[in-house]
Amino acid sequence: MHFCPALEEEFRRRYPEQNGDYLGFFGAPYRIIYDPGFAWNFEEVWRVPGRDKIDWHKYYPNGFQYAVQFDGWGVAHEDNPDSHHMTLMHHPLENAVSLADLEAYPWPEFEEVDYGYLKPKVKEIQAKNLAVFVWAECTIWETAWYLRKMEPLFVDMGDDDPMAAFLFDKITNLACFRARKFAEAGADILGLGDDIGMQSTPMMSTEMYRMWLKPRLAKVIAAAKSVKPDILISYHSCGYVLPFIGDLIEVGVDILNPVQPECMNFSEVHTKYGDRLSFNGTIGTQQLMPYGSPDQIRAEVRRNLEIAGRSGGLFCCPTHMLEPEVPWANVEAYVAAVQEFKQ
């Protein structure tokens, strides 16, 4: 369960003695370590030496209307006055026309990152009997289209353009390096993922997915498991991903997140894949959490936990960040329902 700033502030107001630690207060069994290569990572970009010295504006000749930040890959995130946490994204490789343009781009050199902080942080979390979850989502596909822009990248893929292969391979190899680092540090769960589903359809055909993304995801997972075979692989994709679930299992995914109820039926998914896959999510944040009643939320939590049954395999939680529209009573109803079922 992750709060937007407005709900974080509400938590601080209600429970000032907790110093903002809502995960600890509500009994979350994990703590997050962020991958320095996670797209949208602004606070930890300093861990990639020299990235804060690059003049990224030269990749954006049209400039910006609002305040802008550059993430660790050089993608520009312009303030969006119409959204809480989604930005107006701009793409530094949108106008690239050749492999030379991609080769000349200032790629992050993760080999130069000081990972000395990692093992002590992992041990500190695990000493509290908590799981270490590495947030390394936007693993391949999303980072690629953030850089290139989605439409040109789909054209590259459709044309079998070498630029697409270069871009995907570069991002994949960098992800493999970081996956090994987190496995070496002893992380319990490696959170990979890319949004490959839309509200009611896949974002691409299964044929295109299997050609471009599946073998590269397999490579990242193999890199982590070659170091720590028992590391759990969580895969995130919003939207309708039913056609891809078998492929995800084949490449080594252990946990699927978030199983949006607006897009897929959890009972159907669990019936077909519950003997081979665990699940994280299932409590809708598009409709149920912001607009449902506390009683409806309690009923949905019980229903989904009963579907999982005695075999377990479901970490029942909201499918995305809880936004300002979510009433505090609904937050407490969700937590209470989970705790009551467990008891």
Image (spheres, rainbow, N blue to C red):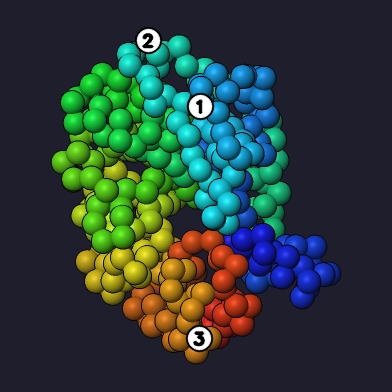
Residue bearing the label numbered 3: 293
Expressed as whole percent of the image width and height from the top left, the position of residue 342 reads: 52, 81
Q: Residue at x 18, y 45 (%)?
A: 205
Vertical comparison of 231 with 201: above or below = above
Q: Earlier in the sequence, mark 1 or mark 2?
A: 1
Secondary structure beneath dot 2 equals helix
Near mark 2 (Cα within 10 A), the count class, few <14, some 14-19 or many ≥20, is few
Q: Residue at x 50, y 89 (%)?
A: 295
Residue bearing the label numbered 2: 100
Q: Earlier in the sequence, mark 1 or mark 3?
A: 1
**Which label sits in the foreground, 1 or 3?**
1
Which quadrant holds the C terminus? bottom right
- The single residue placed furthest to the right in the displayed view is 17
Which quadrant holds the N terminus? bottom right
- Rounded to the nearest angstrom, the CA distance separating label 1 from label 3 is 46 Å
The circle drawn on residue 62 is 1
> Mark 3 and mark 2 in contact (Cβ < 8 Å)?
no
